[in-house]
Amino acid sequence: MLNNIGLPGLLLIAVVVLVLFGRGKISSLMGEVGKGITAFKKGVKEETKEIEEAANARDVTPADEKDKA
C-alpha cells in the first residue's frame, strides 16, 4: 500500500503537516524527538557498560592456575 508514495507524495504530506501544525509546533516536536533519541542512546551506552563491567568482574583465571588449586 505504501510502496508507491514517491517523492511528490512525501512532499505533499510534509506541506499538509506544516500547514496544519505550524512551524513552531513541529520545531518543538522535533526537539522532543531529539531529546528522546539522546536519552535512548545514553541508556543503551550505560547498559552496555554495566554488562562489560559484570563480565570483567567474573573470575577469569587461566585453566592452568585452576588445576593447581
Image (cartoon, rainbow, N blue to C red):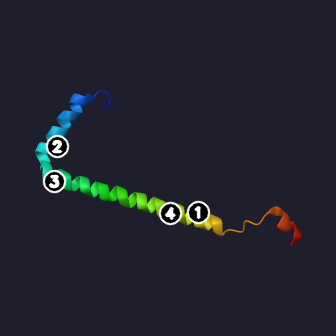
Label 4 or label 2, whichever lies nearer to me, is: 4
The image quadrant that residue 61 belongs to is bottom right
Q: Name the residue under label 4.
A: 47
Circle 1 SS class = helix
Dot 1, how many residues are within 10 Å of its Cα: few (below 14), some (14-19), or many (20+)? few
Dot 3, how many residues are within 10 Å of its Cα: few (below 14), some (14-19), or many (20+)? few
In the rendered structure, which disc, 1 or 3, sits on the residue that comes first in sequence? 3
Q: Name the residue under label 3.
A: 25
Give the residue displayed 41% in from the left and 57% down from the top.
41
Circle 4 SS class = helix
Relative image position of residue 57 (x, y in whole percent): 65, 69
Instruction: Give me the C-alpha separation between circle 4 and circle 2.
Output: 37 Å
Give the residue displayed 25% in from the left and 30% down from the top.
7
Relative image position of residue 30 (x, y in whole percent): 24, 52
Looking at the rendered structure, the kind of residue marked 4 is Glu
In the rendered structure, which disc, 4 or 1, sits on the residue that comes first in sequence? 4
